[in-house]
Image (cartoon, helix red, strand yellow):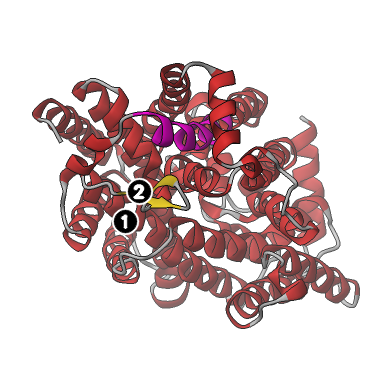
Amino acid sequence: MGLETLITFIVYLIGMLVIGVIMYRMTNDLSDYVLGGRKLSPGVAALSAGASDMSGWLLLGLPGAIYASGLAEAWMAIGLSIGAYLNWQFVAKRLRVYTEVANNSITVPDFLENRFKDHSHVLRVISALVILLFFTFYTSSGMVAGAKLFEASFGLPYQPALWIGTLIVVSYTLLGGFLAVAWTDFLQGSLMFVALIAVPIIAINKIGGWDATVQAVGDISPDHLNMIEGVGIIAIISSIAWGLGYFGQPHIIVRFMALRSPKDVPKAKFIGTTWMILGLYGAIFTGLAGLAFINTQDVASLSEFGISVITENGVQMLDDPEKIFIAFSQLLFHPVIAGILLAAILSAIMSTIDSQLLVSSSAVAEDFYKAIFRREATDKELVWVGRLATLVIALIAAIIAINPESSVLDLVSYAWAGFGAAFGPTILLALFWRGITRNGALAGIVVGAVTVIIWGDFLSGGIFDLYEIAPGFLLNLIVAVVISLAGKPSDGVETEYDQAVVELKK
């Protein structure tokens, strides 16, 4: 990496830490630390949700998958686009209203306990355990992506790169809490958007235009241009099923809870959906252009940045497809711009890790420490418990990520399925059905989470190749409905549901 690139990169990192310090001074209580006092504008909420959602997957995982396998991997983008839109359309406003009606709930487990009047705290604890389990893997995926970035950009060995990336993101999350996370995510989301539009346009232009790019890809591998060839129905359903995950992702739906007003939802929905669709297109075109570029242009200089090119069946390929965006940043741009693009990758990574660490630490502080051990704990005490939890969770996630062969996409898919299957049906039923009971919600969460673990880790072949979120989501829904129909909601639950509906209509 050149000196100009390095300086640009460091300036960006310092800027993120400055935001953390500023927001530290604005964080007075636990509500500020985990929800920002419900003060987010629609633009900040939308880009913050998108940036925390997409992570390094958008700049590393998806372009790498398209680069290696072609448009067959684009079905996932279709499913995600539909799921994100439906989440904004049906969940955002209702959740923003209902969490305030339900005793001003500030975390997902907090909302579920208040929604179902669960005085035993079992629903809260089980929900918090699910969050801690799957977010540890999710956070680990971001740390793998960060290590790959530092490894390719600075020539560092994988493990030192992993610990440096972890230290940076933990620092500002630890300081500023939700406000630091939301505002850094807003800036990072903006940077990611510009990068995903600029990189494929410049790469395609360098190749000779869109027609020349498509021709080159077709000459190298015609299957790369076919969304259906070699893709079975189970693979297509699996990819589209990613969209189901949105309804249960705590780090995304907490942005809905943090909006300053339910009236801001339509504007946030437009901004968030537009950002996501254009970003996904950019990632797909980056992957396709990458295959053409690596095989038609001079890429010998990549070795200077620690990125290896190998030849398979006469086709030049990166040894790690997930580094194609990093390769473009080094090959196509002035060192200063390259530094900004590398910062965009780090933005994508950090914007998700910080959100996941924050939700996990809030689960420890609010849903374990306060609910189970010290109900009289002060807000200041809880904030410091949350900060300590951030450190511990980050350390565990980094240990999981210590294997340099780890795949960003594999780790993300496992955690995404876990949250989608455990919380997705529960959140939807809690918001739209007054008859769901505490026992139904609890059983559904457990069944959804366990299905993902068993299906993903112990079953394979045939129907079991179906992405585990689909059976997990379906079984959660069935179990929650059946058990709820066999019982009745706790006292006051239906009255509060009706109150939330009245507030929504206002």
Q: Earlier in the sequence, mark 1 or mark 2?
A: 2
Give, as a three-letter code, the residue at label 1.
Val
Which secondary structure dominates the residues rendered in magenta? helix
For residue 295: magenta? yes
Q: The residue tagged with tag 1: helix, strand or loop?
A: helix
The answer to whether any part of residue 114 appears in the image is no
Read off the magenta span: 280-297
Residue 450, relative to residue 251: is it above or below?
below
Residue 56, relative to residue 486: is it above or below?
above
Horizontal side, residue 119 vs residue 20: left or right: right
Residue situated in front as seen by the camera: 464 or 428: 464
Quarter of the image that includes the C terminus: top right
Q: The residue tagged with tag 2: helix, strand or loop?
A: loop
Horizontal side, residue 171 vs residue 365: left or right: left
> What residue is pinned by disc 2?
29
Which residue is at a point 50% across and 38% down the rendered structure image?
287
Give, as a three-letter code, the residue at label 2.
Asp
Residue 91, relative to residue 371: is it above or below?
above
